[in-house]
Image: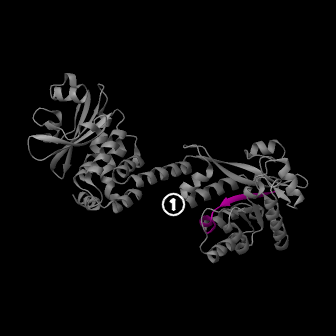
Amino acid sequence: MEDQTRITEAVRQAADPLQVMHRVADQTCALIQGAEGTLIALWDDGDVLTYVCGSGYLEAFAGLTLDISASLAGQALLSGAILRSDDTGADPRVDAEECRRFGMRSMLCVPLMRGRRTFGVMIVAARRAAAFDTADELILRSLAEFVGVVVSAASDLDRITAALLADDSEIAQLTGDLERRREIGPDGTRLFMANVLSPDTAGDLAARRRIEQALTTNGFGIVFQPIVDLQDGRRVAFEALTRFTGEPNRPPNLWFEEAHAVGLGEQLELAAVERALSHQSRLPPESQLAVNVGPLTMSSVALPELLRRADPARIVVELTEQAEVRDYAALNQAITAVRSTGARLAVDDTGAGVSSLAHILKLAPDWIKLDRALTTGVDRDPVRRALSSSLVSFADETGSRIVAEGIETAGELEVLRALGIRYGQGFYLKPPCPLDALLDAGA
């Protein structure tokens, strides 16, 4: 079979074969709900099977042998069929003494084949009766060919890893039955394979799945935090902030970092912007809406198109500092396209690092947002006051607005006003909340 040959060549020379077999055992034990342990046994055409590795409570039995002639595993080996015993205590096909010694009350024996040749058996077991059903057999039947190829080979994970991430057609045939007959789906199948072949890649697949679920199952929402005129208390703008509803429960920045790590950062940021823009018509007509994007999304051709569907003259696009900007000329070109819609530019997190000051100098933003690192404790720290004051002078000379983020105390608010900072946001003024709550409170 051509697919087998190609996968074998992809796996060959990649890793210690025993490590690969251990991952097969571990992942099979994790995939089959009732499984408590797994053993992989190899055959050298003699009278016995040799257990080469195990997982769960059976791991300690690696190195022992099993007589082919008087065991269910031997019958699976010789027949090439998956065999199941729901109660080894009452099943004449099994080696009763061996099952008692191993604590196997129920078991599934899966022949491992390379082409038409059977070279071993994988035993999935539990210490209770009737732990498995027909659906479990279907799962193992669907994966048996893949497992057989992997166990009989050993190597180069790079190409097979890429195939798994891309849902490559050459492994689709090996997993079709599993996806159709059991509610595991293609992601579950690829995760099993990736965990066997490359645990690091499996983590990427799990992350990708989380982000895709957030994108396709309404897994995030938008809350809004007012930006207030510190002189008269008027709400001049509302910053849209993303909040995720799925697992794991973690801060939004970690969701976006993970999305960027698996190549879905731009897609997730654009989806968040689109969701935020859908609320713009409900905001007070004189107010601005601020949305956050990183450099990659700022350079997306899709961003100006999204802005034009709303009222771009009332939109501020905040550039967040997610990655180092290596090409300011290209970024400025993208910002020009965004500004051509009528939207304004804000630089976020100013004062948090040297690179944020470079943003100000090279991008000439309309709004400069002081990071909470400068705001927090500004009423008690002369250094913070001096830095904030210098940025106020810079903003006055360049015609930019200064917005202080993270205002959490009356003392901070008083000092920021005294420094001439006109606008601010923070929990002391109003925490982020759903738009309905803001409007009900009289936005």
- Residue range in magenta is 287-300
Q: Residue at x 24, y 53 (%)?
A: 149
- Residue 315, placed above or below residue 182: below
Q: Where does residue 11 sit, x and y in percent of width and height?
A: 28, 58
In front here: 411 or 428? Answer: 411
Locate residue 78: give its quadrant.
Answer: top left
Residue picked out by circle 1: 263
* Residue 286 seen in this snapshot: no
In front here: 302 or 269? Answer: 269
Q: Is residue 299 magenta?
A: yes
Q: Where does residue 17 sit, x and y in percent of width and height?
A: 26, 53
Horizontal arrangement in the rendering, residue 148 relative to residue 176 (left or right): left
SS assignment at label 1: loop
Q: Residue at x 12, y 37 (%)?
A: 68
- Residue 428, placed above or below residue 318: above
Locate residue 424: give its quadrant.
Answer: bottom right
- Residue 368, placed above or below residue 105: below
Locate residue 62: give its quadrant.
Answer: top left
